[in-house]
Image: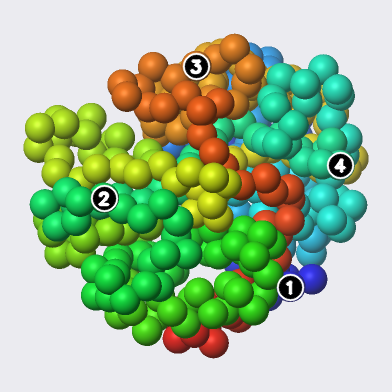
């Protein structure tokens, strides 16, 4: 398995009773690829909702997926809570996830859940271009245009960031290997400036250090909520026409085979509850995915209005091939 080389030790945070061997005597064990600071307050509420002990072990999503594949049917995990769809797709591909009930799957539109019915998205984030209107009149309508000469020296991006790598994986799925390799070379030749993360890209665009950047939507909304709209120069551009740069990726959850199924399903249903969906909207400015739950973030376009590319999110599992391509391009 390509991601098996990413194995790392797990960090634990316990909300319930632990066994002396590090396992859980009762309740459920969650492997979480979502950041502890973000998700633990919600998982504390989940524990009360499920009515049983919950033990959480944290790590990166790709690393945890590799760990789960390594552990196989000996894993103590009942649930895998992933930051992105690709890691869930990797487990689905290897048959490590159990089917979810149709009633649970049906709460979320089909494009935001696994095609095999074994994982479901719980929150969504959109790739966008951010631009500085003092530097350029507007951003291009396709990421493919960023390789044109007029954007030379004006682009900021975060090549080591998981969201950028998921976007490149999506481009590989949509446009093919050769076209994506050519695009990466074009970005590199256009002297795109690398940053450590999405926040740094946004700050660089906002200050005018670069004119346009590739980020996820919620970084901008978090900055506006913190600084006030009048104190943020950068603007967002949602890409039209199913462009690869408009990918909507999801955080999601899947049950491991041989899980404590009844309790684990209660946990999944809690993550799809209005309370949990509102938590993602309010705390991270992500999109709630359950039908009928809408975000209250000011000026956030409705999810239904976005023109994301049609893609099986489970196919974002081929991260290792993307990393190889990024290394060949000299980006990581």
**Lower sequence index among marks 2 and 1:** 1
Q: Which residue is mark 3?
A: 294
Q: Of discs 2 and 1, which sits in the foreground?
A: 2
Q: CA distance from mark 4 to mark 2?
A: 40 Å
Left or right: 219, with 76 as reference point = left
| Residue drawn 15% across the image and 40% down it | 232
In the displayed structure, would residue 168 be above or below residue 288?
A: below
Q: Which mark is residue 116?
A: 4
- The x and y percentages for residue 138 are 26, 50
Gap in angstroms between the C-alphas marked 1 and 4: 21 Å
Q: Earlier in the sequence, mark 1 or mark 4?
A: 1
Q: Residues within 10 Å of mark 3 (few under 14, many from 20)?
A: some
Q: Residues within 10 Å of mark 1 (few under 14, many from 20)?
A: few
Residue 211, given in percent of the width and then of the height, sits at 21, 60
Q: Which mark is residue 145?
A: none
Q: Nearer the viewer, residue 259 or 1?
A: 1
**Circle on res. 2:** 1
- Marks 1/3 in contact by CB < 8 Å: the verdict is no
Q: CA distance from mark 4 to mark 3?
A: 26 Å
Query: Residue 114's image quarter?
Result: top right
Residue sitting at 50 percent across and 16 percent down? 294
Indicate the secondary structure of the residue bearing disc 1.
helix
Residue at which label 2 appears: 138
């Amino acid at each position: 398995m390509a991601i098996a080389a990413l194995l790392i030790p797990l960090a634990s945070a316990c909300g319930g009773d632990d066994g002396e061997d590090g396992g859980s005597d009762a309740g459920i064990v969650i492997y979480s690829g979502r950041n502890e600071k973000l998700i633990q307050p919600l998982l504390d509420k989940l524990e009360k909702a499920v009515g049983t002990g919950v033990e959480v072990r944290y790590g990166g999503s790709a690393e945890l997926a590799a760990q789960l594949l390594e552990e196989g049917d000996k894993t103590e995990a009942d649930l895998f809570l992933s930051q992105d769809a690709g890691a869930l797709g990797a487990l689905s591909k290897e048959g490590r996830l159990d089917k979810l009930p149709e009633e649970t799957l049906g709460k979320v539109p089909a494009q935001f859940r696994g095609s095999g019915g074994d994982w479901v998205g719980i929150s969504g984030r959109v790739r966008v271009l951010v631009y500085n209107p003092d530097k350029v009149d507007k951003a291009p309508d396709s990421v493919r245009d960023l390789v044109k000469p007029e954007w030379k020296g004006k682009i900021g991006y975060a090549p080591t960031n998981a969201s950028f790598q998921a976007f490149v994986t999506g481009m590989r799925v949509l446009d093919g290997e050769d076209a994506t390799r050519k695009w990466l070379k074009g970005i590199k030749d256009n002297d795109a400036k690398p940053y450590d993360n999405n926040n740094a890209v946004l700050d660089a665009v906002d200050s005018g250090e670069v004119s346009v950047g590739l980020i996820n939507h919620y970084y901008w909304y978090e900055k506006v909520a913190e600084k006030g709209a009048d104190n943020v120069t950068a603007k967002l551009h949602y890409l039209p026409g199913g462009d690869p740069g408009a990918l909507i990726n999801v955080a999601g959850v899947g049950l491991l085979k041989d899980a404590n199924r009844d309790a684990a399903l209660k946990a999944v249903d809690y993550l799809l509850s209005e309370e949990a969906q509102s938590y993602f909207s309010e705390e991270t400015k992500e999109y709630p995915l359950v039908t009928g739950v809408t975000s209250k973030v000011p000026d956030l376009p409705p999810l239904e209005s976005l023109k994301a590319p049609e893609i099986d999110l489970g196919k974002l599992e081929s991260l290792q091939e993307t990393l190889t391509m990024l290394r060949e391009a000299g980006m990581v």
